[in-house]
Image (cartoon, rainbow, N blue to C red):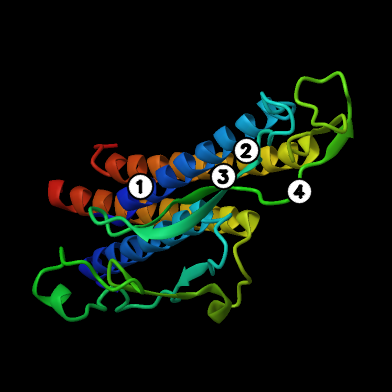
Amino acid sequence: MQVNGVFGLASQRAVWLSARQMTIAENISKANTPGYVARDTEPFKAGVGQHRSGLAITNSLHLQPGNIVSGVKVVAASATGGQGTNVETELMKSIEVRNDYEVNTAIVKAFHRMILASAKG
Amino acid sequence: MDSLLASVRAAGSGLKAQSERQRIVSENIANANSTSQSGGGDPYRRKTISFVETLDRTSGARIVSVASISRDRSDFPVEFDPGNPAADGNGKVKLPNVNPIIEMADMREANRSYEANLQVIKQVRDLVSMTVDLMRST
């Protein structure tokens, strides 16, 4: 894979991970709200984060509809295999997000160091 | 607004909601024995709180807020105590419909949810700090 391909992919992954973190935060804050169904993001694949609709295409600062967060589609958790709002499950998901994020930033750092090394000669 | 910072907004609203709930629980516990001032009158009536999901305009996050604080409409327990100033003609006193065991269980759940929201804020802070660390030279 080309080096600039890596940076693009890592950036998309970072966007997806932040959208997932936000969904988890919303789930946890509503753990005691009656009638609330836990949500989760769609699985990650290249090209995620490009969903925009209507006004948001012209300017990304427009409010996006509730089921799109930073361009990532969000669905009810049961659709992705989860079950209801369970605080422990959400906390475990947030640990996954954290680990993925660390790996992601470490990869970016490593490639950045390689580029610097080749630039300095 | 950026997703990570919006997460802090959502978790902050959770903290606020749970501390509101904690306040209601402590009011209930403190008034668990507050009878009426006059004979035969109604004592303290237990308060209940309910939450609802709302949209925060500035960040685009779906936050939680207090829907309403209302009163528990169940019957008051009645005790026979003629010497009590709140006793009616038959010597019966109405006591508040507060069950301390239920209030304690509520308080523990509020505590647990509060801590979970705190963990979310800590995690987001770590994620942002990891990203900023990318700018370090080493």
Would you say B126 lies left or right of B119 here? left
Q: Position of residue B32 (x, y in %)?
A: 73, 30
Three-letter residue code for mark 1: Arg
Residue at image mark 1 = B9
Instruction: Give the secondary structure at mark 3.
Output: helix
| Marks 2,1: beta carbons within 8 A | no
- Local packing at callout 4 (Cα closer than 10 Å; few below 14, some 14-19, many 20+) is few
Is tag 2's residue or tag 1's residue first in the polypeptide sequence?
Answer: 1
> What element does badge 4 sit on?
loop
Q: Residues within 10 Å of mark 2 (few under 14, many from 20)?
A: some
Report how far apart the C-alphas of labels 3 and 4 lie in the structure.
Answer: 35 Å
| Residue nearer the viewer, A11 or B128 | B128
Q: Residue B75: which disc?
A: 4
Which is more N-terminal, label 1 or label 4? Answer: 1
Q: Nearer the viewer, residue B10 or B99?
A: B99
The answer to whether B5 is drawn above or below residue A11 in the figure is: above
Name the N-terminal-most of marks 3 and 4.
Answer: 4
Residue that carries the numbered disc 3 in the rendered image: B116
What is the C-alpha distance between the residues marked 4 and 1? 40 Å
A18 vs B58, left or right, is right
Q: Are marks 1 and 3 in contact (CB under 8 Å)?
A: no
Q: Which comes before the other along the chain, label 2 or label 3?
A: 2
Disc 2 from disc 3: Cα separation: 9 Å
Neighbour class for label 3 at 10 Å: few (<14), some, many (≥20)? many
Residue A96 appears in the picture as rendered: yes
Within the image, what quadrant is residue A14 found in? Answer: bottom left
- Can you identify the residue that label 2 sits on? B111
Q: Which residue: 31% across, 46% down? A: B131
Q: Are marks 4 and 1 in contact (CB under 8 Å)?
A: no
Where's residue A78, x and y in %? 58, 77
Classify residue A107 by image quadrant: bottom left
